[in-house]
Image (cartoon, helix red, strand yellow):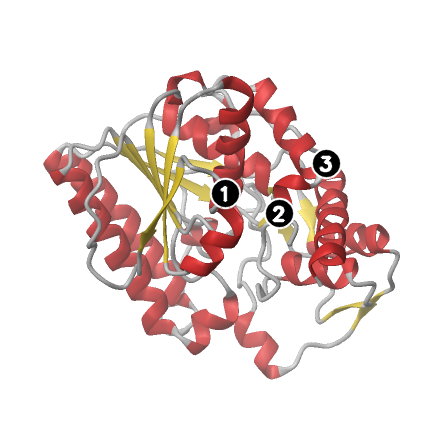
Amino acid sequence: MKNILENEIYTGDIKKVVEKFDFSPLKGKFILVTGGLGLICSSVVDLLIIYNKYYKADINIYIADINESGFSARYGIYPYVHYLSYDATKSITFNVNVDYIIHGAGLASPELYVSKPVETMLSNFNGVLNLLEFAKCHFVKRMLYISSSEVYGIKDSVKAFEESRFGSVDINAIRSSYAESKRASEVLCKAYSSEYGVDTVIVRPGHIYGPTASPKDKRISSEFAYLAAQGRPLEMKSLGLQKRSYCYSLDCAVAILIALLNGEQGESYNIGHDEVTSIREMAKILAEAGDVSLKINDPTEEDLKQFNPMDNSSLNNTKIKAIGYSDSFSVSEGLTHTVEIIKWFQKFNS
């Protein structure tokens, strides 16, 4: 079976960002990553692996995840990447000392917010609570929590979301299980920072896509990328005019590490691309990358339940740029690379 880190396009993209940014403060550190097999955090781990390889950084990485077989297949060949059995809904049982925690575990697929709202809420809130206690008791230097742009809710303004301005979340809608538990988890991080001195920092990714997404991921950017890579037509169930700050997973990984190193304690940082792209524009790029057709149809009632209620969820990324982040890939480049990498991966692992 081929590993994604054997793909020249993907490793070339990682080398590009490794050479562009200074990650030297992480040399020799021990980093715990929860959800390290997911879309975002596996990109973080892959970046650290390539950084270790080319800079002899001696970073030890602990991946806390529920899927041990998936870990072995993906990271088992690296002696400095270690597995920890972890379920975000349960108390922590591992006993390790680490310098940093990057917490990205949790349910992150819209159909689950509706079909498994209890698990969605508990994996978010209890997962953060247990890790904050761990950080407090083990004197962790910093814990970075990966929240979501969905905490902003629905706004009236057409301007991009800034970190300090929020809209409303409809707590009568079961899909709000995700947004509300993310909001509560953020407040808990700030509470531990304020009351107990636990150094926490928060990032709010926008709409992240990339070849590290699971084939089972039903977010439209992930689902369409796989369909395009398989040569299958794309079918939209709305006009797709909603605006998003679509961000390549490797740009997101860089932003996370920049916030981990340079962010201010207790602060929150948006992660989104300079370019604002509509869902329709995103789908068109993916269709062209896969050389497939794009159709637009009316949504079903079940589709409507899963829709993100925000028409414009573009993010103002001024704050994270002020601490050292900048985009490395255009939206078109990132989406096209995503399709090409998935196509390569499926060719060698089908």
User: Label 1 belongs to which residue?
Assistant: 77
Vertical placement of residue 208 versus 28, above or below = below
User: Label 3 belongs to which residue?
Assistant: 8
Disc on res. 93: none
Relative to residue 193, is residue 56 drawn left or right? right
Toward which corner of the image does residue 232 lie, by quadrant?
bottom right
Identified by mark 3, the residue type is: Glu
Does residue 266 appear in the picture of this structure? Answer: no
Relative to residue 76, is residue 140 drawn left or right? left
Give me the C-alpha separation between circle 3 and circle 1. 18 Å
Question: Depth check: 193 or 291 in front?
Answer: 291
Give me the C-alpha separation between circle 1 and circle 2. 10 Å
Identified by mark 1, the residue type is: Ile
Give me the C-alpha separation between circle 2 and circle 3. 11 Å
From the top left corner, tell me how far across and down residue 159 is, in percent. 56, 41
User: Disc 1 vs disc 2: Cβ atoms closer than 8 Å?
Assistant: yes
Disc on res. 3: 2
Residue occupying the point 41% across, 58% down: 68
